[in-house]
Amino acid sequence: MHYINMGKKISIIGLGKLGSPMVAAYAEKGYSVIGVDVNQEYVAKINEGKAPVSETDLVDCLERNKENISATTDYREAVLNSDISFIIVPTQSKEDGDFSTDYVVRAGEEIGKVLKEKSDFHLVVLVSTVTPCSTERYLLKALEESSGKKCGEDFGLCYNPEFIALGSVIYNLLNPDFVLIGESDSRSGDILESFYKNFCNGASIKRMNIVNAEITKISLNTFVTTKISYANMLAELCEKIPGGNVDAVTDALGFDERIGHKYLKGGVGYGGPCFPRDNRALICTAKKYNVELPIAEATDKINKNQIPRIVERITSLISDKDTVGILGLSYKIDTNVIEESQGVEIARILTDGGIEVIAYDPAAIKNAKEVLGERVSFSSSLRDCLLNSDLSVIITPWPEFKEIKPEDLKEGSRILDCWRMLDSNKFKDKYLSIGIYHE
């Protein structure tokens, strides 16, 4: 293995939900980082040491490492003054489930123009999630045509997706379970492996060709979604069998080391910007090659069924004039992101059916208002939401919901606990849940 000393200068193309935390995390490890984005507001905030997006520890990390961080809208400035360029731009889902590479190609073209005038070997690393064969078919082609240079000789290319969760991005970057590297050539792979051995000591590094790395990325996320849907399938079954309790079942299953406890808890369906679309992208990829993926299709089907299942449960528990309190609008805790949020979609369906809804979330109210508008009333506090609801429904398991007490509820009201966070014995007849048989 031949490591090449590429210095400690990094450029990050794209300063969104993952790009900005990457800037902060790399700077935290002593790298000199230049961020690039077409959004001048994002660029200005990075240069001021402020966070363009909401993410745990991002503000402190940017402030702490201001001397190692700069941002620009100029690709030339960034690429000429760095050794490795990480591309983390949007790859939006198409109608068929495939991912668009439009922004990736555009970034590749801009980087290629700069590589024309750069004599040093430069490594380009794609972080954005793409479907198999996209990196070489689209990004590699854009880089070579724009630069007039040859990949593997004049510059390198790797596919290096991150496995992170919004709300813990910086922690996940600094403490990965493993690092996945898809390499165009061994020299490029050596450079990136050397970078990660300095950046996150001790993490396992898996190197392979680019296509296998692309397959690994979407199949890993899809495996996790399958585990979530399996737990939700068991929850629905346990609700129908006298004495059934999904927590007793999944807790026992999780002690088998072949299964494990992570993501094995019956609750609401999965959402967010990665899980739903990665599962659909795997299905789309299979169709291109005339392969059927019944497990992936079943996972998606089960997940889509969770919202109508919970809506049906809610409507069975209320009268026409009751107000439903939705507790949790972000797709998961520790983030304000509402993309494919179960709480937002449940609120929308209920209001479409003429049901009055009041909602509360510690972080996502502003974003939810932009989607739900005036159809939903929003509470500024958990207490206010509980006191104005005839049925309160815990959708997102924010830690503060664990502190709810029976006396916090409106007189005569009940609570539907989709994650079984509360002690049912304390609430008695005020308490309901999913995943557990109720007579």
Image (cartoon, helix red, strand yellow):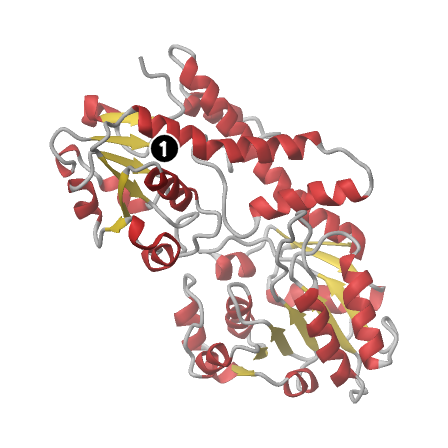
Q: Nearer the viewer, residue 305 or 162?
A: 305
* Residue 232, x across and y down, in percent: 49, 29
Quarter of the image with the C terminus is top left
Report which quarter residue 371 is drawn in: bottom left
Quarter of the image with the N terminus is bottom right
At horizontal 55% and vertical 60% (from top left) the residue drawn is 173
Mark 1 is surrounded, within 10 Å at the Cα level, by few (under 14), some (14 to 19) or many (20 or more) other residues, namely: some
Q: Can you see residue 431?
A: yes
Q: Disc 1 on helix, strand or loop?
A: loop
Q: Nearer the viewer, residue 171 or 264?
A: 264
63 to the left or right of 69: left
Q: Can you see residue 252?
A: no
Q: Nearer the viewer, residue 16 or 70?
A: 16
The residue labelled by disc 1 is 418
Three-letter code for the amino acid on which mark 1 is drawn = Cys
At horizontal 50% and vertical 71% (from top left) the residue drawn is 24
* Residue 359, x across and y down, in percent: 28, 46
* Residue 231, x across and y down, in percent: 51, 28
